[in-house]
Amino acid sequence: GDKVSSVMDFMVKNRYSYAPVMENTKLLGVFSQDTLFSHIANTSEYIFDDNTLIKEFGSLIELDKHTCETFKFAPKTATVFDIDFMFKDGIMGEKRLEVLFITEHGRSDEQILGLTTIWDVAAYKSKANI
């Protein structure tokens, strides 16, 4: 399994806020700052060593277990306008839509082809003058 320290280093170096947690081609969940915060709040454990594994966060990485974040799926045919609308419409109660996973038909049981965030959409719109 992946070590928390390695994933966090990768996230920081690449300025990523979210890391998909995969098993082969299946999406198990997402590791994020919210995952860490929830873990600390639930366990009062603040110390992670170099051997701490992502899987030790258990259900906290599951897509529906994030306290402030939500995740959705979009088909590979979705346009930037479709995706922009999904993010604008993406506040669900107390949770914000943070990541759209792209799959063949927009279903959660399909292989992940890619992902996008609101920041990706904003950067695209800025470059394209949309």
Image (cartoon, helix red, strand yellow):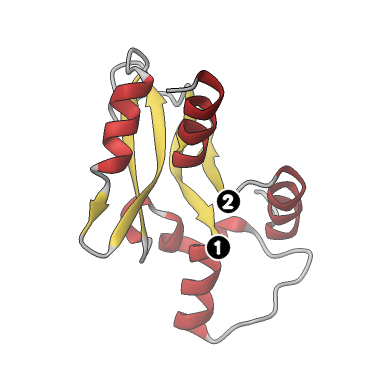
Task: Find numbered disc 2 in the image and state the secondary structure of the residue it sits on.
Answer: loop
Spot occupied by residue 44 in the image (x, y as percentages of width and height): 54, 87
Residue extending furthest toward the bottom: 44
Spot occupied by residue 92 in the image (x, y as percentages of width and height): 22, 55
* Residue count near mark 2 (Cα–Cα under 10 Å), binned few <14, some 14–19, many ≥20: some
Disc 1 designates what residue?
33
The disc, 2 or 1, on the residue closer to the chain's N-terminal end is 2
Q: Are marks 2 and 1 in contact (CB under 8 Å)?
A: yes
Disc 2 designates what residue?
17
Question: Is 105 or 129 nearer to us in this picture?
Answer: 129
Residue type beneath disc 1: Gln
Quadrant of the rendered image containing residue 104? top left
Q: Is residue 44 above or below residue 12?
A: below
Q: Is residue 119 above or below residue 38?
A: above
Spot occupied by residue 130 in the image (x, y as percentages of width and height): 42, 23
Residue type beneath disc 2: Ser
The residue drawn where x is 34% and y is 32% is: 84
Spot occupied by residue 85 in the image (x, y as percentages of width and height): 27, 33
The residue drawn where x is 26% and y is 53% is: 91
Question: Is 68 or 36 nearer to us in this picture?
Answer: 68
Is residue 6 visible to us here?
yes
Task: Find numbered disc 1 in the image and state the secondary structure of the residue it sits on.
Answer: helix
Residue extending furthest toward the front: 129
Find the distance from the CA under tag 2 to the CA under tag 1: 7 Å
The residue drawn where x is 56% and y is 23% is: 127
Question: Is 36 or 58 nearer to us in this picture?
Answer: 36
Q: Is residue 112 above or below residue 31?
A: above
